[in-house]
């Protein structure tokens, strides 16, 4: 295995089905493109199906004959998540990869259609519900993986405040994002604990470091100034940012409960490697409490 792991190290993916949320742009698009080039049947699970179709066409240009389809999915709506899961299970009784990639960052205070704080509701609760509804199609599949994309932001003002999960008492866009990304990791670790010995599926996490994508459109004004001035120094391309996800999803040496990110200074740039996460992310009691609360909020229970 190349020490500087690249897209060229992705094994052959023929015969595998990969569902990727938020795959019409940025990290999700780059992840989908590489998997399609390697032969996977790729489902772009996106809110805007017109943009999804445009992305599918671009992938087909890069990989003629690729099996790329578009699935409508709005992670801000539990009704949409349930409908998408029903359609995915019907169309794909066997799912090899579920890549929970979609997300929002630093949004003004808003709520999902179900009344959840937008960042926590989209980034964590939406993916929690989708995973729970698709997991039965994955458990018997050898080599199947749930890969959830977190962020270095899980360390920044990040805390699971169970007394104010929806940020009703006070709201900080930075803290809310950090909370959602911390929740992504806690979900991964608790899911892996539940999966152990229950089937073929493993749960893994990844983060892209600093990547130049549309996710930064809601950055506070001072950070936008820094991004414009020093973006190339602080961030890497979306194609490079997708590599930790691709390694977590495909590399044979990956084990359940691992976390992959860039190997550069501060994990902001570089090639993917195994990395560590914050002390808070490993709080087992908090992981289990978050799981129980997430089941209550979404109404989704897992088969493990």
Image (spheres, helix red, strand yellow):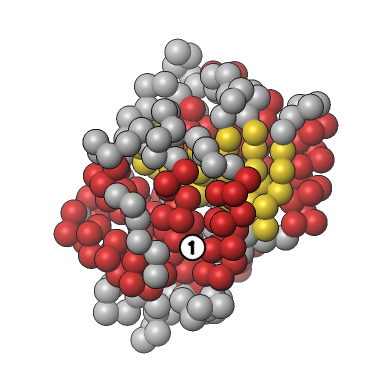
| 162 to 281, vertically: above or below | below
| Picture residue at 63% right of the left edge, 45% below the top | 91
**Residue 206 % position (x, y):** 43, 41
| 155 to 194, vertically: above or below | below
**Residue 7 visible to the viewer:** no
| 124 to 139, vertically: above or below | below
Answer left or right for 8 relative to 279: right
Answer left or right for 189 relative to 64: left
Q: Quadrant of residue 285?
A: bottom left
Q: Quadrant of residue 273?
A: top left
**Residue 42 % position (x, y):** 64, 38
Q: Quadrant of residue 16?
A: top right
* Pointer 1 local density, CA inside 10 Å: few below 14, some 14–19, many at least 20: many
**Residue 263 % position (x, y):** 43, 31
| Picture residue at 39% right of the left edge, 79% below the top | 167
| Picture residue at 33% right of the left edge, 30% below the top | 255
Quadrant where the N terminus is found in the figure = top left
| Picture residue at 54% right of the left edge, 19% below the top | 11
Q: Which residue is mark 1?
A: 126
Task: Identify the secondary structure beneath mark 1.
Answer: helix
**Residue 21 visible to the viewer:** yes
**Residue 88 % position (x, y):** 59, 50
**Closest to the observer: 259 or 255?**
255
| 150 to 1, vertically: above or below | below
């Amino acid at each position: 295995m190349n020490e500087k792991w690249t897209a060229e190290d992705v094994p052959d993916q023929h015969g595998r089905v990969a569902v990727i949320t938020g795959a019409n742009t940025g990290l999700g698009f780059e992840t989908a493109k590489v998997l399609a080039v390697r032969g996977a049947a790729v489902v772009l699970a996106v809110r805007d199906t017109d943009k999804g179709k445009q992305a599918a066409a671009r992938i087909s240009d890069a990989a003629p004959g690729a099996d790329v389809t578009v699935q409508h999915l709005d992670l801000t709506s539990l009704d949409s998540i349930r409908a998408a899961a029903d359609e995915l299970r019907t169309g794909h009784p066997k799912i090899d990869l579920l890549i929970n990639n979609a997300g929002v960052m630093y949004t003004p205070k808003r709520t999902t259609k179900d009344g959840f704080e937008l960042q926590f509701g989209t980034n964590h609760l939406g993916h929690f519900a989708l995973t729970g509804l698709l997991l039965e199609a994955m458990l018997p599949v050898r080599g199947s993986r749930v890969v959830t994309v977190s962020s270095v932001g899980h360390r920044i003002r990040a805390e699971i405040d169970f007394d104010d999960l929806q940020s009703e008492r006070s709201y900080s866009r930075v803290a809310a994002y950090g909370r959602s990304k911390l929740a992504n990791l806690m979900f991964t670790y608790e899911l892996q604990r539940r999966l152990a010995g229950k089937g073929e599926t493993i749960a893994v996490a990844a983060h892209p470091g600093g990547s130049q994508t549309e996710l930064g459109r809601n950055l506070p004004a001072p950070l936008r100034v820094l991004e414009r001035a020093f973006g190339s120094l602080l961030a890497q391309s979306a194609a490079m940012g997708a590599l930790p996800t691709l390694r977590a999803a495909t590399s044979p040496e990956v084990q359940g409960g691992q976390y992959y990110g860039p190997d550069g200074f501060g994990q902001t740039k570089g090639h993917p490697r195994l990395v560590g996460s914050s002390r808070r992310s490993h709080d087992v009691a908090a992981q289990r409490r978050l799981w129980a609360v997430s089941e209550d909020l979404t109404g989704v229970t897992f088969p493990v």
